[in-house]
Image (spheres, rainbow, N blue to C red):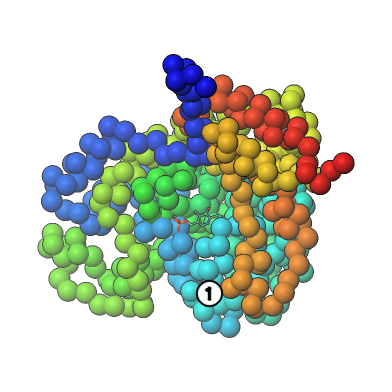
């Protein structure tokens, strides 16, 4: 190649990307100038505004969605000897938190190989005399039918918890019909505080218990004592340090205000993906109906049967398009396999065919077209083992 004609690499199409800028920098600088760094008035304001966006009374900010899930179980007295129904098609935190409270996760299959929501029929079949709770996960931000799960939970006397890590901003569909809902502000979620989480708890007393348990089970906070609103404290629960700090509270307030617009952008890009994929790659399917309520957290597709996914992902990477898969089934991880072999056919079939394509608010419609074009090229390559 002639040195006079250097190749210009194509811009990278990122799988996801947090949107951060001057408003976030200013909010962080303000906290530093204020001199009060840990859980204080900004965190409290963030809780109130998060609750208002979701149409509920109040919320509790914590260090992560993992902490939010753990405290949701603990504050409802789920513990040793109890079984908790969980989807295997989720991030591993959904099952780990069950272990953290001393209970046992019981993995439930999906509705179908192309519908990645936990199956109510399979959950019903796995209920025993020890079942105490069920955690449902809004895969990709696509709303579960929480009222149907609440009816199931009530019939069996179970605590219903939502893993809403993908679903911040799904007003009316999360945080209203369950006992508790946990949200994540990890860097790759729809809004971020770098690390962080929020929990919505329906019952006021349990909510205050979650609030205490995020800070050692203490009855007053450092801020209350600093401001002279409280003297001393008692400890009424064995709690944790799952607090959120003011820097994250300030970031959260800025990001929360921008969240509805970002979710709109994600939905519009998802609609474009559906349209372009249907036209150019009808063998590649997008789970859920186009009008299913969603925060459009990720863009999952199902590759045609027999596709070599590794080769497709390598081709995409070479063409500077990032991709991923959500998720390796939890019941197949070594640490969970040791509890006993289990087969969940729909979960395994979904996991084998799923590919996650780039989706974030800064993506341009032309990027969507480029991703689909690149995927079409990848799928047109014959397999090494085919004749
Ligand atoms: C990200 C995620 C979590 C964990 O959230 P953290 O805030 O990182 O603890 C839990 N469940 C699901 C489905 C997630 O995607």
Q: In the rendered picture of this protein, how many numbered marks are placed on residues? A: 1
The front one of 125 and 166 is 166
Splitting the image into 4 quarters, where does residue 379 fall?
top right
Splitting the image into 4 quarters, where does residue 341 fall?
bottom right
Badge 1 is on which residue? 99
* 364 left or right, relative to 26: right
Percent across and percent down for residue 92 are 55, 62
Residue lying furthest top in this view? 4
Q: Is residue 364 visible?
A: no
Percent across and percent down for residue 292 are 66, 38
The front one of 366 and 28 is 366
**Residue that appears at 42% across and 63% down:** 67
* 61 left or right, relative to 33: right
Q: Residues within 10 Å of mark 1 (few under 14, many from 20)?
A: some
The front one of 95 and 11 is 11
Residue lying furthest right in this view? 387
Percent across and percent down for residue 260 are 46, 34
**Residue that appears at 57% across and 67% down:** 95
**Residue that appears at 13% across and 62% down:** 226
Residue lying furthest bottom in this view? 81
Splitting the image into 4 quarters, where does residue 267 fall?
top right
Mark 1, secondary structure of its residue: helix
Up-down: is 287 above or below 234? Answer: above
Q: Quadrant of the C terminus?
A: top right
Q: Is residue 314 visible?
A: yes
Up-down: is 214 above or below 199? Answer: below
């Amino acid at each position: 190649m002639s040195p006079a004609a250097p190749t210009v690499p194509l811009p990278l199409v990122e799988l996801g990307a947090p949107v951060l800028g001057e408003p976030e920098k200013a909010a962080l600088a303000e906290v530093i100038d204020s001199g009060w760094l840990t859980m204080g008035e900004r965190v409290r304001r963030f809780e109130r505004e998060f609750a208002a966006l979701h149409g509920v009374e109040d919320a509790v900010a914590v260090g992560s969605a993992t902490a939010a899930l753990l405290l949701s179980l603990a504050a409802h007295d789920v513990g040793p000897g109890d079984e908790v129904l969980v989807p295997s098609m989720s991030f591993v935190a959904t099952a780990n938190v069950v272990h953290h409270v001393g209970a046992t996760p019981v993995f439930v299959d999906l509705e179908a190989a192309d519908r990645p929501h936990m199956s109510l029929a399979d959950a019903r079949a796995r209920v025993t005399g020890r079942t105490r709770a069920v955690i449902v996960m809004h895969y990709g931000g696509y709303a579960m039918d929480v009222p149907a799960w609440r009816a199931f939970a009530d019939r069996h006397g179970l605590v219903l918890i939502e893993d809403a890590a993908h679903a911040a901003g799904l007003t009316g569909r999360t945080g209203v019909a369950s006992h508790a809902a946990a949200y994540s502000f990890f860097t790759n979620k729809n809004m971020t505080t770098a690390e962080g989480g929020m929990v919505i708890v329906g019952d006021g007393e349990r909510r205050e218990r979650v609030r205490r348990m995020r800070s050692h089970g203490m009855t007053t906070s450092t801020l209350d004592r600093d401001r002279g609103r409280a003297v001393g404290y008692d400890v009424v629960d064995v709690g944790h340090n799952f607090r959120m700090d003011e820097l994250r509270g300030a970031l959260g307030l800025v990001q929360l205000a921008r969240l509805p617009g970002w979710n709109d952008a994600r939905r519009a890009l998802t609609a474009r993906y559906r349209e372009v994929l249907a036209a150019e790659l009808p063998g590649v399917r997008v789970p859920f109906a186009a009008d299913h309520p969603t925060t459009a957290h990720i863009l999952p597709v199902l590759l045609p049967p027999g596709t070599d996914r590794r080769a497709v992902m390598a081709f995409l990477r070479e063409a500077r398009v990032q991709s991923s898969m959500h998720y390796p089934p939890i019941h197949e991880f070594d640490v969970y396999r040791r509890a006993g072999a289990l087969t969940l056919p729909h979960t395994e079939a979904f996991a084998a065919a799923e590919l996650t394509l780039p989706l974030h608010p800064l993506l341009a419609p032309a990027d969507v077209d480029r991703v689909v074009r690149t995927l079409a090229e990848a799928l047109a390559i014959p397999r090494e083992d085919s004749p």
